[in-house]
Image: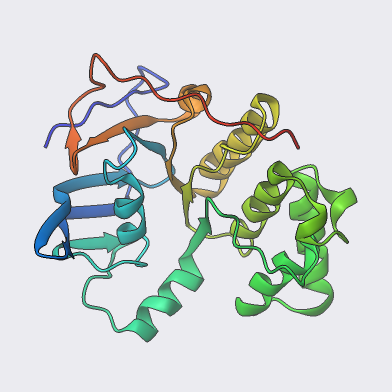
C-alpha cells in the first residue's frame, strides 16, 4: 500500500534498518450478534530513528493499531516484526520481556501509580529494567529535568496538573533508553510550548540514540516535527490526507 512520506530533507538518506514492520493486520470484534472490523488489512513499515504520527478521525482504528504494534493486543490476522523480532506468536512471557526491554509506552490516561511520587514512578520502571538504588534515583531526576519537572519530583500524582502528569508519564517512558516509543496522544494535555519541547526531546532521541517514535495524535501543532504522517480511516491506511480532514483542536490543560 502506498504511503505518503513527508521528508525534512531532499538529500537522499542512507539505508537504515526497519524498526516496525506490519503486514496484513486485521482486528475484529464481536459485538452482540454483529462482527465489527476495527482494522482491515494494515501494511506499515517504519525505519529506525523516524518519528511518525498516526492521524485520522476518532474511531478510525489508530489506537487499536498502536496497541497491536506494541504487543498489548493480539491481531485477528497478520504479522508484526519489531527490531528484527517477529512478535506475533510469542508466548506472553517472552512478549512481556521484549516489551520491557525495548518499548516505552506513553498512555493517554497517564497510568501513574497514585501512591508514588513523580520520581518514584520513574524509579519503579527503572527497577523493573534492573536499574536500582542511587543509579535509579539519579536517572529519574535527570529525566524529570529533561521534561522541566525536577521541582515536582516529590509530588504525588494527585498534586500534579494534567500536563504535569503527562510529562511524568513521558519521562517514565524514556526510562532505560527504549529503542521504541509508542505514544497515544502525548501532547493533548500540554500547551503549545511544552508540547514542542517534548517533541524536540523525542526528536533528539531519534537522531542521537536511533530511537523510533510512533504516536497517535489529533494535534496539528506537532506535524512539522514528524518525518511522516500516516492517515488512518475506517480501519485502513489511506495514501494521503483527505481533502476534508480537519483534526480537532486538542484540549489543552496548562501545566
Q: Horizontal placement of 229 versus 49: left or right? A: left
163 shown above or below 125: above
* Residue 57 occupies quadrant: top left
Q: Horizontal placement of 141 versus 76: left or right? A: right
Q: Which quadrant is the C terminus positioned in?
A: top right
Residue 211 in the image: state x and y as whole percent: 49, 50
Residue 218 in the image: state x and y as whole percent: 44, 32
Q: Horizontal placement of 183 versus 192: left or right? A: left
Q: Nearer the viewer, residue 139 or 35?
A: 35
Residue 239 in the image: state x and y as whole percent: 17, 27
* Residue 122 occupies quadrant: bottom right
Q: Nearer the viewer, residue 25 or 134?
A: 25
Residue 177 in the image: state x and y as whole percent: 59, 59
Residue 24 showing in the rendered view: no
The residue lying at 82 percent from left, 64 percent from top is 138
Residue at far top of view: 243
204 shown above or below 138: above
Amino acid at each position: 500500500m502506498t504511503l505518503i512520506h513527508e521528508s525534512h530533507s531532499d538529500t537522499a538518506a542512507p539505508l537504515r534498518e526497519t524498526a516496525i514492520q506490519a503486514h496484513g493486520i486485521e482486528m475484529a470484534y464481536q459485538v452482540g450478534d454483529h462482527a465489527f472490523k476495527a482494522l482491515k488489512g494494515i501494511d506499515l513499515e517504519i525505519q529506525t530513528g523516524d518519528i511518525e504520527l498516526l492521524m485520522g478521525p476518532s474511531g478510525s482504528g489508530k489506537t487499536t493499531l498502536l496497541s497491536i504494534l506494541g504487543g498489548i493486543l493480539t491481531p485477528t490476522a497478520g504479522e508484526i516484526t519489531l527490531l528484527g523480532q517477529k512478535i506475533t506468536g510469542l508466548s506472553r512471557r517472552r512478549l512481556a520481556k521484549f516489551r520491557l526491554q525495548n518499548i516505552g509506552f506513553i498512555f493517554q490516561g497517564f497510568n501513574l501509580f497514585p501512591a508514588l511520587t513523580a520520581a518514584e514512578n520513574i524509579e519503579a520502571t527503572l527497577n523493573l529494567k534492573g536499574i536500582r538504588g542511587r543509579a535509579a534515583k539519579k536517572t529519574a531526576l535527570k529525566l524529570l529535568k529533561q521534561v522541566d519537572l525536577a521541582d515536582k519530583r516529590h509530588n504525588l500524582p494527585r498534586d500534579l496538573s494534567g500536563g504535569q502528569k503527562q510529562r511524568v508519564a513521558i519521562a517514565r517512558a524514556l526510562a532505560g533508553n527504549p529503542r521504541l516509543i509508542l505514544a497515544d496522544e502525548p501532547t493533548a494535555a500540554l500547551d503549545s510550548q511544552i508540547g514542542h519541547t517534548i517533541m524536540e526531546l523525542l526528536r533528539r532521541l531519534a537522531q542521537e540514540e536511533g530511537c523510533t517514535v510512533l504516536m497517535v495524535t489529533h494535534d496539528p501543532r506537532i506535524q512539522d516535527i514528524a518525518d511522516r504522517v500516516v492517515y488512518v480511516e475506517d480501519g485502513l491506511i489511506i495514501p494521503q490526507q483527505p481533502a476534508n480532514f480537519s483534526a480537532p483542536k486538542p484540549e489543552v490543560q496548562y501545566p
